[in-house]
Amino acid sequence: MGRLRQKGKAGAAKAYVTRTSAIKKLQCSLADFRRLCILKGIFPREPRNRKKANKGSSAPTSFYYAKDIAYLAHEPVLKKLREHKAFAKKLSRAIGRGEWSDAKSLEDNKPVYRLDHIIKERYPTFIDAVRDIDDALCMVFLFASLPSNARLPASLTENCARLAAEWQLYVMHTRSLRKTFLSIKGIYYQAEIMDQTVTWLVPYQFTQNVPSDVDIRVMLTFLELYQTLLGFVFFKLYTDSGLVYPPPLDVKKDEGGAGVGAFSLQSSSQSASSVVSKTTAVEVDGRRISSKDVRQAIKTMTNAGPIADDDDNMQVAETNPMEVDEEFIPQQSTSDPQSTSSLTTLKALQTLPQSLTTSLFSPYTFYLSRESSRSIFEFIVRSFGGRIGWPTSSGSGSPFDESDDSITHVIIDRPLVERANETPEERERRLRRKYVQPQWIVDCINAGKILLEEPYAQGKTLPPHLSPFGEYEGAYDPTAGQQTQGADESESEDEAVDPEGEDDEEQEEQPAEKAALRAAATANDPASLRAAELAAEVAGVDFGTFEKEVRKSRKKSKAPSNEEEMDGEQDMNKMMMSNKQKKLYEKMKYSEKKKASEVRVYYSSRICPALIMI
Amino acid sequence: MAALDANHRSKKRKQVEKDASPEPPTFSAPVESLEMLSDEEGVEDAASDDGKVDEFPEIDAASDSDEEDSLEDELGSDESDEEDVDEDEDEDENSDDSMDRDIFPKPKTIISGITGKPKRVYPDIEPDYDSDSSTEDAPNRVGNVPMHWYDDLPHVGYDMEGKQVLRPARGDELDKFLQTVEDPSAWTSAFDKNAQMDKPLSAEELDIIRRLYANEVPDAGYDPYEPTTEWFTGKGKEEVMPLSAAPEPKRRWVPSKWEKQKVMKIVRAIRQGRILPSKPKTSNKTEFYSIWSEPSTSHAPPLPAPKPRLPTNSESYNPPEEYLPSETERAEWEALDPEDRERDYLPQKYSSLRLVPAYDRFIKERFNRQLDLYLAPRIQRVKLNIDPKSLIPKLPSPQSLKPFPNYKSLKFAHSARARCISVSPDGAWIISGDEGGVVSLWETNVGREVKRWKFAGKIGALEWCPRLDVRYFVVGIEEALHFIIPPNLPSPMLAATQNLLAPSSLPPPPETPSQVKWASLPSASWSSAEAILTVHLPQSSGLPKQITWHRRGDYMATVSSGGTQGGVWMHQITRRHSQAPFKKIRGAVQLVLFHPSKPHFFVATQQYVRVYNLSEQKLLKTLMPGIKWISSMDVHPSGDHLIVGGYDRKLCWFDLELSDKPYKVLRYHTRAIRSLAFHPTYPLFASSSDDGAIQVFHSRVYNDLMTDPLIVPLKILRGHSVKEGLGVLQVKWCPRQPWLVSAGADGTVGVWCS
């Protein structure tokens, strides 16, 4: 007979601990435990059987892996937190006793924890870290725009703003921005870093107020981690692309509201060479210096200085010439020439033409009018290779002013106003430039090509702005019906030489009619049929054709109904499904039906928007 | 000198203590005794200063000791000491009195008889609040007993002489009130429990009350702010003489060696840099370095958190019109709890970017995301990206499974419940029996009744003999089995049948006489109207529920509702012999079946199906269908599969080579299953139930052991009506066609054709 097994000594009862017992084991406060969990990325687990994990009790508790907690017990940060507790006691005692010098020395030697090892543990490889910086970026961008108060020191906001600027600088430098979406929540950006897509959300530039039901301590703990993480990630990104991290900040420019422009990117090879040259100068002291040396030294000195804030600072000059790489040549076997597979080599990849999308705006020069946000469009335009200038009211550091002749586009977000007193020179300038609304920039990026400026011109009603991230499969596609329309329009635009208004109108009308008829075809129940009828009336379809269409669709739908009857017979097969499968099937059917109904609602409302109001 | 002086003082103090002991409250604690000492001295002084009691002059210690010394010198002897003590005693009293200088009456000054000096004499001490209450001269001497003991008595206690102290008269409330009005001192009087009457409070008591109210010390004589008396400090009281004449030790003026060593240790540590004199200030600035250039740990990284969902078109600042919510949708969204909302925002449309306001829930959303990150348990869920249709098991379509009975082709009516049917081995004839004792023979194709027999009592079971060379059927009624030859047989077959059932030379009877009697009609009266052979089952064996044939047609097994040995009898036609295969059987036998190819015998009791080997006469296996009450059973023509139905609506498919447990349990009937039948040639089986429905299944059995049998529900045949809770009582297949014959409780027998 084997050993008697005691209850609660193995299995789920051992593998899980409740939060209370975890805190008891770690001998820390709940706040400290939360902090640790946030920093270490430990989250509660759902045991398969709560009763077994909680020793027979079904009280609502959160469970953690016992191993996770054991892992936390060895955490240096936990030790530091305990030290901090002792320190806080000492300090309060010193202050209570009025021992000011003691308090000061205590405060000077306050225990501070570092998160380097946690970053290394949580993200063993750099790719892991890059994959997980979405939330960090969101937080940093949010806190960069928060007003500082007692809970949020100004230094924190400053640091966040610095990190945000560093990130934007890097994205602009490497031209890795891919998609942008102007949503009601803020602006979504998506960049591709190290083959990982990084999506972050930046709020519109307004002062945010921290709501009272938000625990700011939790957010600050997260922010603490995120700042460290981003610091390390940026260090690696900068150094990998041969830049100095942190990029030096020009305080004067920063005070002038230069934003991103206050930082200057510096090539690390240059700074290294300057250091080297300095050391050689020390060594050289006392030796005869040739004129060549002097010239070289001067050259390195000029290169080493921070490059002026212009577009030039993006293009860091490569000082060391590229060595000529040897090409991989597949060695064919004599017996079987097809056996070797040819792989794409790095060289082949490099010789591929760079996709146009990253340098989409490089032929253009933009000027921001003062009501459009500079922080958004400077970032977007510069990450796609464009040049951009802005009025001084949007901050200092504009590379050119409004009267510059190179300006091709003006991003303007104002209604059209008749200008009465306009000098001919101004008028000429106005006609030469294209005035577009900000959405044009974003839509161009998402489309990957330069769109026609016409629909986005100043004062026009904008075409809808769609998400570049796509929807789930089978979702309602608002562009589905319009593509033909768009094609028609472009055609008509091409044929704009002979202006035939009627023709255009007809062409415009047709799709609407078609849509109405399609709605009639899809309408099954009397209510939707009625809606479709109304829609047809709105679209100008006469009742006869509508009826015909309905009858046709009925006939069409009758055939499938026969098929459905067959399906009904097939439903007998469902009898053979297990209960579990049956449930799963019903669930999937339900969600499918729900999605389909959603799409139908969108369609019907597109055909007749007035119906929604009924 | 000083030491001696101290000795003397302590001795004196002891004396004082000893003397003062009879007065416990004031002399209980040593501190107080010290006080007393000072008092005494004060009094002494006062005595010498001629009655300046109120003043408490400063006395310098030296002079005091001098005085005492001089006094001692004066007296010198022990006697004088005693006298001195007496005097002290007096003076103690005096001093005691003098403490309560506010309350006590003035003393009288008389000339002392002993010393001849004027002396103050106080009146006798009246015991007061601070003295022991036991010495109080209260009239009532009952002591501290609960006064309610005297509640019923006219007196309230006893005085010192043992006389009753009568209860003072107490008026009613009105009197009390009047008294308070009349008596000006009423408001300063309190109820005395011992005397059972109101006693006016004394001035001292009122003073105490006042002091307690004012948060003062209740004792009026206590002065918390007494002036300090400096005895040993101050000018002229310094001790100038050293206490010891020893020379000052060297350590007082030589620097400590050990201290130096300790300091040097620290100095050395600082020099070597082991101790940092002032640690560099801790800074919040973290230095960044290339953290990922070092090799990573082998520790598996935690699972990355799922990324939030990417925004869709409806979140755009300028979405297409159709995404905008209608009024009702908006109201619905707002009515929902924030947790229940499908989307946490309402789509909105702005005509231009500059009009887009700040999103008011931005911080809240970030916060919620973080709560999700550190408070929510994460489950890795496998997302099923499959077509739901693929979940439906891939079965051949019913069209490809044809033929199977589809419709009711004809109906044959009985006047009573049609209990049992049987289809002849060639499939052309059907016999059906009802509860009224009528057995009808009719054609399968057209339903024409050829012959009708009438028996006494219910028909329990009837069955055709499966042999093709002879033709007869067996009808089971109460305690008898009748062997009947149908009419219109070709003469060779008729002769063979007659020869089989009633041979001219009877086989020898068994050695042990059986309970079952075989009786043939005499050959003269042979006709199709009468049973040619009758087997009389033993008495009280009841109605035969089932008749089942061995495939060869020589053996026949019957199950009766009553009787011993489970009511199972096995009859051999050629030997005209019946035997009970089981001496004893556990449980009530419901059904029996012969295996189609092996000498196996299935016996279904109420819950189990037992498989016996008849040739070896042993139990092979027990099948456990998990049915509460087995109603029906049939074996697949291959003999490897068995279906068992129960009154609890279950249909169990057994793979006999696989397990004792059902391979599949089907529950499609809504009422009890009554009958099951496998088609002998087609891969079909049917089940009938009390819900009036017949379900037809396709059951394909594969020869290779690896492939599971395929069961496909084909068709639900409805057409029988439910009568008195009974539906379709029996189903049988036509042997050569995929036709089904069913007998219903509504008295109809239907033929279902494909």
Image (spheres, coloured by chain):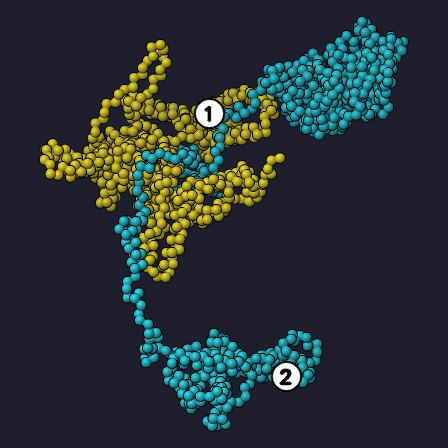
Chain colours: A yellow, B cyan
Please report the residue visible at 26 percent of the width from the left and 21 percent of the height from the top.
A326
Residue B186 appears in the figure: no
Tag 1: Cα neighbours inside 10 Å, few (<14), some, or many (≥20)?
many
Q: Which residue is mark 2?
A: B139
Identify the amino acid type marked 1: Leu
Please report the residue visible at 34 percent of the width from the left and 79 percent of the height from the top.
B237
Please report the residue visible at 38 percent of the width from the left and 85 percent of the height from the top.
B66
Q: Which residue is mark 1?
A: A517
Look at the picture and state if A313 lies above or below B193.
above
The answer to which of A322 and B672 lies nearer the viewer is A322
Which of the numbered marks, if any, corresponds to residue A362? none
Res. B606 image quadrant: top right
Residue B685 image offset from top left, x and y in percent: 67, 19
Look at the picture and state if A141 lies above or below B101.
above
Left or right of B55, for residue B255:
left
Quarter of the figure that contains the N terminus of chain B: bottom left
The answer to which of A203 and B189 lies nearer the viewer is B189
Q: Chain of mark 2?
A: B
Look at the picture and state if B79 lies above or below B287.
below
Residue A240 appears in the figure: yes
Tag 2: Cα neighbours inside 10 Å, few (<14), some, or many (≥20)?
some
Q: Could you say whether the residue bearing mark 2 is in a helix, strand or loop?
A: loop
Identify the amino acid type marked 2: Pro
The answer to which of B283 and B272 lies nearer the viewer is B272
Left or right of B175, for residue A360:
left
Left or right of A131, for residue B738:
right
Please report the residue visible at 33 percent of the width from the left and 31 percent of the height from the top.
A194
Residue B692 image offset from top left, x and y in percent: 70, 25
Q: Give the CA separation, mark 2 to mark 1.
A: 121 Å
